[in-house]
Amino acid sequence: MKKFIAVLLLASVLSAAGCATVMGPYYLEQEEYEEGIKVMSGQLRENPDDAPSAYYVGRYYLALNKPEQALPYLQKAVRLDPASADYVFWTGVAYWAMMDFDRERAAYEKAIGLDPNHISAHLYLGHGYADRGQWAQALRQYEVVLKLDPYNPEALYNRARALRGIDRTSDEIAAWKRFLEYYPDGSMAMTATEQLNLHGDFTYRNHIIGKRNVTLRSLAFKPGTSVPDADGRASLDVLSAMMRVNRELTVNIVAYVKGNAPLAKARANAVRDYMLNGNPDVNRSRLPLSWFGTAENVQVGDKAFALDQSVNFITEVR
């Protein structure tokens, strides 16, 4: 009840302020698009030359997946304030939703002309080139974005796609790794890892842990030893956390070292010891071991690979 009253009070304050630049973002953030249309349309009737009011009505219609209704308002905002790169950019988004791709691209290019550092315009222009298979042009746009925003996830991911499109394989592999270094979770990480694995690079691997798909950095060891490196220990920390949350989860640790079964056994034991040392509540029986003095055979898509040294995780939920 208190939360409801607080929202009402906030809405009253915003209405009293009568300012589209304050009220407009509020309705977007609250996802109250229809109410936003009602309020901002009223403001626009009272002040037909108010560009922000027209802009936000257009944004609300876009959020409701009604680009045909959004576009006239966005175009009006541009007419009222032609120097606004944001207003021009969002007309491009409306054109995209209406599948008018030539006008979409023209809008992004115009927005960039107004503001050469407009990240979203460069990003979406890159997406348009990628959709057309114009990978070199797409790559240029993604690299501009990354100069402005080095950790932009969409640009990092799609830069790797663009590099694949122009057959720069070594650069593509490095780009997938760069993306995964910053964003190792989620569906994009799963796809990035699969693309990396298709090149025979298993720095990261996808695993089914219980009922979840999880991307983990692969374990690496100091040569000839059972001491995992720091990046590998981070993956073990993720697994340990999942086991603490789900007490029914069992993780089978499976180690492979071609031609050296004793070392494979030592590595399996070292992995289990590390996980148990920091997790006294995890029972040893939940971390069974297997080890083999052979390579691990891995299938990725229609390709098969033999990994001379690896550690895999096979899980079950009791």
Image (cartoon, grey):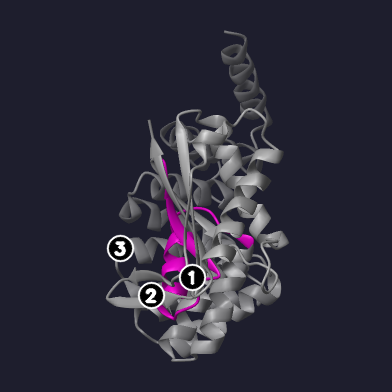
Q: Which residues are magenta?
A: 182-210
What mark, if any, has residue 124 been given in the picture?
A: 1
What mark, if any, has residue 98 been given in the picture?
A: 3
Residue for point 58% across, 50% down:
52
Tag 3: amino acid: Met
Distance from Cα at disc 1 to Cα at disc 3: 15 Å
Front position among marks 1 and 2? 1
Rate crowding at label 2 as few (under 14), some (14 to 19) or many (20 or more) other CA atoms within 10 Å. some
Rate crowding at label 3 as few (under 14), some (14 to 19) or many (20 or more) other CA atoms within 10 Å. some
Of label 1 and label 2, which has the lower sequence position?
2
Q: Quadrant of the C terminus?
A: top left
Tag 2: amino acid: Arg
Distance from Cα at disc 1 to Cα at disc 2: 13 Å
Q: Which residue is mark 2?
A: 103
Indicate the position of residue 32 as horizontal and vertical percent values: 47, 33
**Foreground of the two, 261 or 126:** 261
Tag 1: amino acid: Tyr
What mark, if any, has residue 56 been given in the picture?
A: none
Q: Is residue 305 shown left or right of residue 138?
A: left
Magenta stretch: includes residue 196: yes
Indicate the position of residue 74 as horizontal and vertical percent values: 46, 57
Secondary structure category for the residue under label 3: loop
Residue 217 picture quarter: bottom right
Q: Quadrant of the N terminus?
A: top right
Indicate the position of residue 18 as horizontal and vertical percent values: 64, 33
